[in-house]
Amino acid sequence: MIIPIHFQPKSSMDYEITIDELPCLRFDKRVAIITNPTIAALHLETLLSKLEVRELHIVEIPDGEAYKNMESVEFILDKLFGFKLDRKSMLIAFGGGVIGDITGFSASLYQRGIDFIQIPTTLLSQVDASVGGKTGVNNKYGKNLIGSFYQPKAVYIDPKFLDTLPLREFVAGIAEMIKVAVTFDAEYFKYLQSVDLHDKEMLKEAIAKAVTIKADVVAKDEKESGIRAVLNYGHTFAHVIENETNYSTYLHGEAVAIGIVMANALACKLGLLDEHEAKQIKSLLKHYGLPTEYSINDVESFYEHFFLDKKSANNAITFVLPQGIGDFKLKADIDSDVIKEVLQDFGEEKSE
């Protein structure tokens, strides 16, 4: 299955997302694969058997969100210069969302930009992170605050790579599927309620639907000046949770699941979502084993962290909220007292 991204207006950045067994890839150029030791041990041999290039190099960075930083980018760039790659060379991001984001960012920087392709190996990266050209790294102030919009030349999604994915990481990817279902497609939400995503054919169909939704959104709004911001549903809260827990307690998808519950609580407070719908969403998250609870120790601190978010402007934060299941509303004019009331409901004393 091939899903195209055609940017509006038409652009040379258009590319295709292939969802199928990884095809043979031939490039008459110098290529560097960026991966980590875990993926290299499990799948590098498979990739190498499918790859034919003029000159090949492999760069491994440590596995985990803790290494999604400028130090890793510097390490990669240093290796690329050591290999004497030129502006016609190409990078291959082979791994999950961390590898994809760092590789894309490094590609955007090296000699002012070289090509890269995405071969995602986790469910989260297959349905979300590999599509759309968001690249970047974290710093002490928050998640993905340093980065660029830089589109890959192609994305190859092979569900077979998920066979070795730990259950916790698999489930974390489902949060991103639920995210797009709640905000864009009520029928897709019902589908996720009814299927067994451990069935390979159902999973492939669910991946394709999530990717189709995201590709359509990205094509309309590459640099998040409008509708693409909706893909951040749950993320405004999730990024604070990840920062508070030093990116070591929750996987990204797990934090997004909790963020979705928090965003829904705010939507209910504003009359955009009813309690039954909120319970349906929470129930689906829990059905797949995703966390839905979090104890906020300091409401004021949590609230102030919102203003480090990329969606904040003019001392206001834009929240992505569901308007029923299958629709959304962007709200930037919410009274701070209302937001803090919702956060208080997740306070330590009320979560016990």
Image: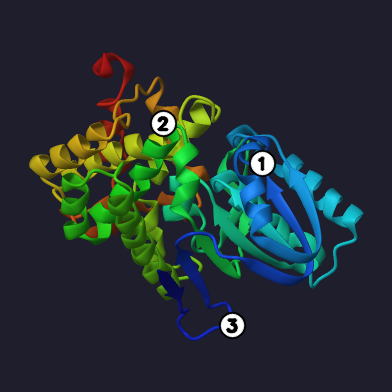
Q: Nearer the viewer, residue 273 or 281?
A: 281
Q: Specify the quadrant of the image occupied by residue 127.
A: bottom left
Residue 12 - label: 3
Residue density around tag 3, few if under 14, some if 14–19, many if 20 or more, within 10 Å:
few
Q: CA distance from mark 2 to mark 3?
A: 38 Å
Q: Earlier in the sequence, mark 2 or mark 1?
A: 1
Q: Earlier in the sequence, mark 1 or mark 3?
A: 3
Q: Quadrant of the C terminus?
A: top left
Residue density around tag 2, few if under 14, some if 14–19, many if 20 or more, within 10 Å:
some
Residue under label 2, please give it.
Answer: 168
Q: Can see residue 146?
A: no
Q: Name the secondary structure under disc 2.
A: helix
What residue is at 85 percent from the left and 63 percent from the top? Answer: 85
Q: Earlier in the sequence, mark 2 or mark 3?
A: 3
Nearer the viewer's eye, disc 1 or disc 3?
Answer: 1
Q: CA distance from mark 1 to mark 3?
A: 32 Å
Q: Name the secondary structure under disc 3.
A: loop
Residue under label 1, please give it.
Answer: 40
Q: Give percent across and percent down for residue 28.
A: 77, 73
What residue is at 37 percent from the left and 24 percent from the top? Answer: 296
